[in-house]
Amino acid sequence: MTMSGTPDDVGSVPGPAVAGHGTGGSGEPDSAVPWWRDTVCYEIYPRSFADGDGDGVGDLPGATARLDHLRELGVDAVWITPFYPSPLADGGYDITDHTAVAPDLGTQADFDALVQRAHALGVKVLVDLVPNHTSDEHPWFREGLAARPGSRARERYIFRPGRGENGELPPNDWQSAFGGPAWTRVQESDGSPGEWYLHLHAPQQPDLNWRDHEVVADFERILKHWLDRGVDGFRVDVAHTLFKEQGLPDAGAGQHQDIHRNHLMPYYDQEELHPLFRSWRALLDSHPAPAGAVPPGERVMVAEAGIFDRERLARYVSPGEMQQTFNFAFLESRWDGAAMRNVVEQSVAGMQAVGAPVTWVLSSHDAIRPVTRYGGGQVGERRARAAALLMLALPGAAYVYQGEELGLPQVELADDRLRDPLWERSGHQDRGRDGCRVPLPWEGDAAPYGFSTAAPEDCWFPQPTDWAGLSAMTQEKDGDSMLTLYRRALRLRRDHPASDAALKLDGPDSGEWFGFERGSGLRCVVNFGAQPLPLDDDADVLLSSAPLDGRGIPQDTAVWMTLKEYDSE
Ligand code: NOJ
């Protein structure tokens, strides 16, 4: 086995440095390359990021005050998950007013201040667009409930009579993503059992009817509202579910078990999505931009689309639609060389077909944290470090979820602290996503570690008592910490823009290890196998996720290196 950049078994020859996509051949960023193609975007889940007013809940002023951390980290953009008014049935994804700020998170002026500070630091701002559903406390839904079946007010949502003799059965067999039927029966205003409404998530999140002209118009208003406030783009929540197949046919068994069938579900991936996305893109490309924001034409939309068929997924980012779509196949992959290699190759091929970059992601507010997912403890941490270097070397964009840069593990919360609707809806089988939403440790020896001035017991989720060593301040001083690794990686990534040459992976078919050129002379090699992998004689190591074993790369380690032949260029 060789670590050579010129392995015999593949056709990928690493050398002379490719005049890179992003470099203009000079090593300097190429202004002709849109910023979002290789951006690193940091996801802020505001309630758990930083608390500015001491009530135990993170908020917008708290986030603004911590933006320097992100600048130091070296990210290009932030995506802020919903900070809109919400009864919090689903962590803020149940919204009563899509153009306001939740009172416990701040004011519109606080949002403006955040955007202004971020832009002053050179950090772009994306916000969440949640078009599939509203809260059941949204004025539209209340109006719909108060109105009669068949009335105009009900057309904004998906109300239907039930099946069975007296309408006592749901209109079809669709299941909620959180468990249980996707339908809830309402009581009509005269007290009689009435129609059913659709909610692909919690009952408190009724689905909007995207064939209704008022819904379409309202989301144009919402997009313009945030563009006028200076945002640089949108992350589009469950972008694949907005339209439901006409006639609402049954979906059949195993609806949420086999994600590879997602595109075949009657409530996913319908054709009408694409003209809608094109209209949003045209709006983003033409609506005037205030000072400080990126100009029209450079704003970005990133789809959260749970579609695992790569050709179907690529359609979301085909020309004139969105620019990015999260690569969940990468996040879902188990820690295994052959599986990871396959997912990287397939993802790149899928996106290349439409000229879009891959948008890599290892974690989010919905996923088990990588350290835990990859095995927990030291093993999990070691793999999460290697995965980070793998992701950040790959060409394309990358999203980093708050706390990923600190290597936080998933927290096992007590039953009575769980808030995720998954917990109740699954009959206490699924503990849900709260364990990755625990407030960040910033500094200090004890909870709440600088997250808040509130007492630890007054913070909206409790932090573990052993997190002092994981705080940002502790890790800043530690040359071997996860935070230091991320900072170094992000700096090196900027200095080594990705090539636009087709990505080729080399390494044995068994997947024990693989390597690739990022371009600009940077080669990344990940060793999954038990045997240390010898380093090339002419390799200069730039960064390693774990200490090397002499001149060998140990198991579960990723290394970034330059090869001397580049230096001679
Ligand atoms: C995806 C969001 O990321 C998740 O947190 C939420 O529960 C669902 N969409 C529903 O909005």
Image (cartoon, rainbow, N blue to C red):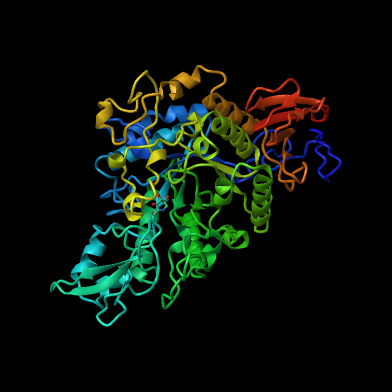
Residue 18 seen in this snapshot:
yes
Provide residue 441's location: percent of width, then percent of height: 39, 27
Instruction: Tally the marks.
Output: 0
Q: Vertical placement of 410 versus 472: above or below? A: below
Residue furthest to the right: 8
Q: Vertical placement of 538 versus 183: above or below? A: above
Q: Between residues 323 and 342, which one lies in front from this camera angle?
A: 342
Provide residue 522's location: percent of width, then percent of height: 72, 33
Residue 113 seen in this snapshot:
no
Quick one: quadrant of the N terminus?
top right
Q: Quadrant of residue 469?
A: top left
Q: Please tell me which residue is depicted at 33% across the width and 55% down the height of the picture.
A: 425
Q: Quadrant of residue 468?
A: top left
Q: Between residues 184 and 278, which one lies in front from this camera angle?
A: 184
Provide residue 104's location: percent of width, then percent of height: 25, 40
Residue furthest to the bottom: 165
237 on left or right of 19:
left
299 on left or right of 177:
right
Quick one: quadrant of the C terminus?
top right
Q: Between residues 416 and 133, which one lies in front from this camera angle?
A: 416
Q: Vertical placement of 68 versus 86: above or below? A: above
Q: Please tell me which residue is depicted at 48% across the width and 64% down the height of the picture.
A: 254
Q: Quadrant of residue 218?
A: bottom left
512 on left or right of 246:
right
369 on left or right of 102:
right
Provide residue 146's location: percent of width, then percent of height: 18, 69
